[in-house]
Structures are given as structure tokens and as C-alpha cells.
Amino acid sequence: MTCGKQKVISLQFQLTYEYSTKDTLFIDGIPFTHTHYADSIRYENKLPTNVLIIAEMNEKQVKEPTNQIAMGRALGIHLRNTGDYQLLRAPELITTGKLTFERKDGKAIEMCFPNNYGMTILKND
């Protein structure tokens, strides 16, 4: 597990990595686990895997590939909904999937993730 603290974090998910339901990202102790089911992302602290199941009927599944923007947006929405974080540079999130955020109270954010996790921590300007 790799951990670090920063006041402002910029990150971007990498689709060359195969996300698993066992992969968990921790932000200030809050776990964000990947899931294959689109419905779970809306109601739980879940992030998409590379392919999402968007519907099931008669034991058949409708699947849709995910991208960096969807992954970044899902995490951004969860963080914003806690009320503790502020999202910065929204246009970058919408166009590239680069998520930049900070705590509203100005404290450093602690983030932990598995070694070799498919995410890049980007330098802030």
C-alpha cells in the first residue's frame, strides 16, 4: 500500500490498468472500491472498473466500457457529496478526467492505494 499527504491532490486514472473489485483507494480513511455494476456507483462509495454492467435481463448483461473521465467524475461526485472537499479545475475533469481537489478546512488529505494501482498523481501548478 502506498500512502501520502498533500493539501491539494490532482489525479488521473489510467485505463491501461485492469481495475478489480479488490482494488480500494482510501481518501482520509474513506474507502472507494471498484465495481462492475453501474447502479452501485450512484449509491455507494464505488468507482467503475474498466467495463460496467449497465443492465441485466434474463441472465444477459449489457456492458459498456468506462473511461478516465467517468472514473474521475465518479470519485469527484462522491468527494463533493461528503461536504468536506472542494473540486478544483472542473473543465479539466470534464475534458481529460484529471481530478483536482482539496479539503474545505485546508488540512492535508491522506490518500492510500495499492502498489501498482492504475492512477497517476499529477503535479499541481
Image (cartoon, rainbow, N blue to C red):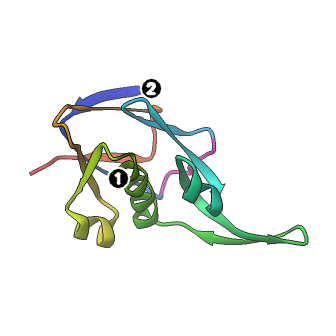
- Whether residue 85 is situated above or below residue 99 in the rendered picture: above
Q: Compared to 108, does 125 lie above or below?
A: below
Instruction: Inspect the magenta stretch and tell me whether residue 75 lies in it.
Output: no
Q: Quadrant of residue 98?
A: bottom left
Of all residues, the one furthest to the front in this rendering is: 83
Magenta stretch: includes residue 18: yes
Question: Mark number for residue 24?
Answer: none
Residue 40 in the image: x percent, y percent? 63, 55
Residue name at image x 61 percent, y 46 percent: 20
Other residues around mark 2 within 10 Å, as few (<14) / some (14–19) / many (≥20): few
State which quadrant residue 91 falls in. Answer: bottom left
Query: 3 or 80, which is in the foreground?
Result: 80
Which amino acid, by three-letter code, is at mark 2?
Answer: Met
Q: Which residue is mark 1?
A: 80
Residue at label 2? Answer: 1
Question: Which three-letter amino acid code belongs to the residue tagged 1?
Answer: Arg
Q: Is disc 1 placed on a helix, strand or loop? A: helix
Please give the name of the residue rendered at 40% of the width and 61% of the height, measured from the top-left corner: 73
Q: Residue at x 21, y 31 (%)?
A: 108
| Residue 19 falls left or right of residue 109 | right
